[in-house]
Amino acid sequence: MDEDKDEKTLIHLKLDKSKSKTRFTKTKNNLLALLNNELINKPAIEETGVKLGNALDHVMESLERLCVHFTEHGDIDSANKTSQEIDKINTEYSESTQQVYDVLQTQKSTSSLSSIPPAETTIEKDMWRQMKRVGIPVFSGEKTKYETWKAAFEACIDKAPATPEYKLLQLRQYLKGDALQAIDDLGHSSEAYTAAKERLERKFGGEKRKLIRFLDDLDRFPNLKSEDAKTIEKFADLLDVAVMNLKQTDHGEELGKGSLYLKLQRKMPEKMLTRFNRWLFETGEDEGVETLKNWINQESVFLTTAMETKHGLKNNGEREKSSSNRAYFSENKTVCKVYQIGAHSVWECEAFKALNTNDRWKKVGMQEVNRLTG
């Protein structure tokens, strides 16, 4: 009895698959016929596009049920073939909706450009051709990379004039791992696209996580031990991010004279902090994170300008090693650098101090010549 029941279920699933595939193919062909007409009927195309999305939902549902049935009964080969059918249907739907987008965009561009003077039209078209295609990264669920991925996806896909169903297919292409698994059970409808975005935001995004990432970066940033241009520039970048994130997450109160402000000051060397406090006293500016950010940015500009003026644009700003003369006047007491007798520095050498200034320089110069010529 169980075998008969399973056989009837399988027959029913296959019939349902056949009907839904026929409906999908017929709707797709109707859509392509509308797109190939010389006279573009936008309302008819949009209506048929919606029908194609509905047909996709039905065929995907029937194929998924069939795939589950094969898997539960151990028919892995048939399950894999059904999975390949799902991929093929997805590809056909993606290609069809892309054609709709291309045709409607072409019509839109033609109608909008017709009112622009020919010279301006040429310039605009040339500029558009030169724009580099933006690459969307594939998001795997790493929370620190979510905001970057989200910005690229929203700009390139979410704001595009396409159906939610097509956008959902695109969304799946740019997800993998935990991120893809998070939306795997939502289906393929327009409502599923909205639900998928909300679920991704809830699991990987949110303003609170953005603020936590910034605070983690701040904790990892080492205390400044010097005031070289590159180090101060990195600190200025950190402050820019701090102010931006606090404003975006509605934590503007943290920009005042609070714990974050004190934490940032403790990253600074004492001499720099002294200059900042003196500047506050002289200018009467209100203390706070944003005030500190503005001051550090200006200091960064000053240091970078000084470094480039002294060392050039291609120099990394590091000081050259000291000249060999420094060795003669160091406090090293290993051996007298002038007479090679006694363990004392040059300035403690009684014989050297007895010489007049000209003789001292002659003595040092002769020692250097002997050293270089070996």
Image (cartoon, grey):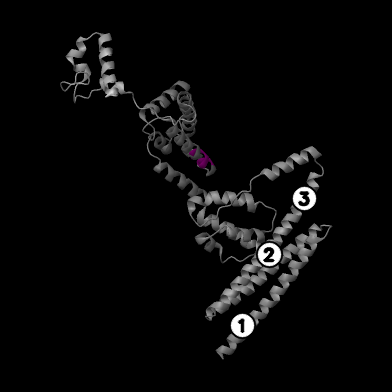
Q: Where does the image place residue 154, in percent across and percent down from the top left?
A: 61, 51
Q: CA distance from mark 3 to mark 2?
A: 22 Å
Which residue sits at x=21%, y=20%? 345
The extreme left residue here reads: 342
Identify the residue position indicated by label 2 in the image: 93
Q: What SS does tag 3 mark?
A: helix
Above or below: residue 25 compared with residue 346: below
Q: Which of the two marks, 1 or 2, is nearer to us in this view?
A: 2
Q: Are marks 3 and 1 in contact (CB under 8 Å)?
A: no
Segment colored magenta:
242-247
* Magenta-colored stretch includes residue 130: no
Give the label on residue 10, or none: 1
Above or below: residue 305 compared with residue 81: above
The extreme bottom residue here reads: 1
Q: Where does the image place residue 306, in percent across and percent down from the top left?
A: 46, 24
Left or right of 266, for residue 140: right
Which residue type carries mark 1? Leu
Question: Magenta stretch: dominant SS?
Answer: helix
Which one is nearer the viewer's eye here, 48 or 83? 83
